Amino acid sequence: MWWVRKLLWQHCSQLSELSEHLGYAGDYRQQPEFMENAKRLFSFFGYEPNSFVGKTILDVGAGSKLKTKYFVGARIFALEPLADRFLAELAWSDLGDAERVYSQPVEVQIGGLRQNVDFVVCINVLDHVYSPEKALHNIYSYLKPDGEFFLSVDLHNVTHVGHPIRLTKSFVKDMLEHAGFKIIREHESLPYAEAYGEGRAYTVICRR
Ligand SMILES: C[S@@+](CC[C@H](N)C(=O)[O-])C[C@H]1O[C@@H](n2cnc3c(N)ncnc32)[C@H](O)[C@@H]1O
C-alpha cells in the first residue's frame, strides 16, 4: 500500500537520507571527484556539456549537489524533497544555483512542469521513493513530446530504510513502458564503478 510506504519514507527513509548528506554523502559531494564522476557518467552516455543549450533540464531527486551543472547554457530545475533542509543546513549545497527548486517528492504532480521539460535526469533515486509508478507517471507528463529521460538506478534485491524499493531490470522496464516511455538505450554498470551504492548500476535512456 503506497500510503504506508509514504509514511515510512517520510519518517524513516528521508531522515536517514538527510543524515547521510550531513555526513559521508556530503563529504563526497564536496570533493572534486563528485563532479569528475558526473562528467564521466554523462560523457559515457554521449552527452556533451552543450547538449542542452537553451533547453530545460529537470533534475529529479537532485540531492544536495547538482550533477546537472555539467550541462552549460541550460535552464536547470531541481526537484528534491529535502531541498529546503539542504539549503538551510548545508552551506556548500549548490541547489540554489538551479533556476527553480521544488522541495517536493516526485510523486506530487507539479502543474507548472507539465510538457515543459526537454530532458529529465534521475540518478540513483528510484529505489528511494515511495511510489516508483507515480514517479515515472509524473516524469512522463513533464516531458515535451520529443523529450528525453535519463534514468540511472542501482538494481538490487534487498530493501531497507535507505532503499525501500527493490529494483530488477524487468520491473524497471515494465514500469517505464507502462508509463508510456519508449526505451532507446540501456546499459549496465558505470564508467567509474559497478554501482552508485549497492547492487549493480543500470541506466536507461528513453523518449516520451
Ligand atoms: C542517493 S541520493 C542521489 C542524489 C543525486 N541524484 C545524485 O546522484 O547525487 C537520492 C536522492 O533522492 C531523493 N529522494 C528520495 N525520495 C524521493 C522522492 N520521493 N522524490 C524525489 N526525490 C527523492 C533523496 O532526498 C536524495 O536526495
Image (cartoon, rainbow, N blue to C red):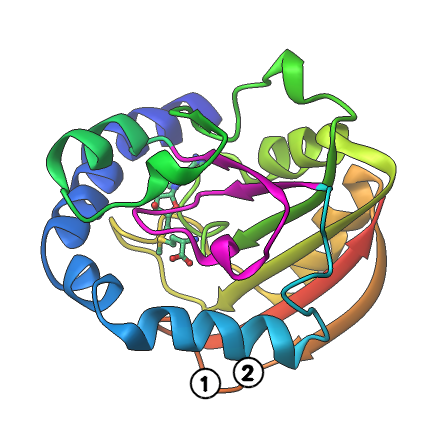
Give the residue type that dot 2 points to: Ser
Density class for disc 2 (Cα within 10 Å; few <14, some 14-19, many ≥20) is some
Give the residue type that dot 1 points to: Glu
Give the numbered dot on residue 194: 1
Left or right relative to 14: residue 165: right
Residue 99 placed where, x, y %? 50, 31
- Whether residue 155 is visible to the viewer of this picture, yes or no, is yes
Tell me whether the residue at label 1 lies in contact with that at label 2, contact meaning CB atoms closer than 8 angstroms: yes
Count the marks: 2
Residue under the image location 14 percent in, 42 percent down: 90
Residue 76 placed where, x, y %? 55, 40
Density class for disc 1 (Cα within 10 Å; few <14, some 14-19, many ≥20) is some
Residue under the image location 84 percent in, 40 percent down: 180
Mark 2, residue position:
189
Residue at the farthest top position: 111
Which of 49/147 is in front? 49
Residue under the image location 52 percent in, 20 percent down: 108
Which of 33/49 is in front? 49
Please tell me whether residue 202 is drawn above or below residue 175 in the rendered image: below
Residue 154 placed where, x, y %? 48, 67
Decide which of tag 1 and tag 2 comes sooner along the chain.
2
Give the numbered dot on residue 7: none
- Whether residue 199 is visible to the viewer of this picture, yes or no, is no
Which of 190/112 is in front? 112
Q: Which residues are magenta?
A: 56-80
Which of 195/166 is in front? 195
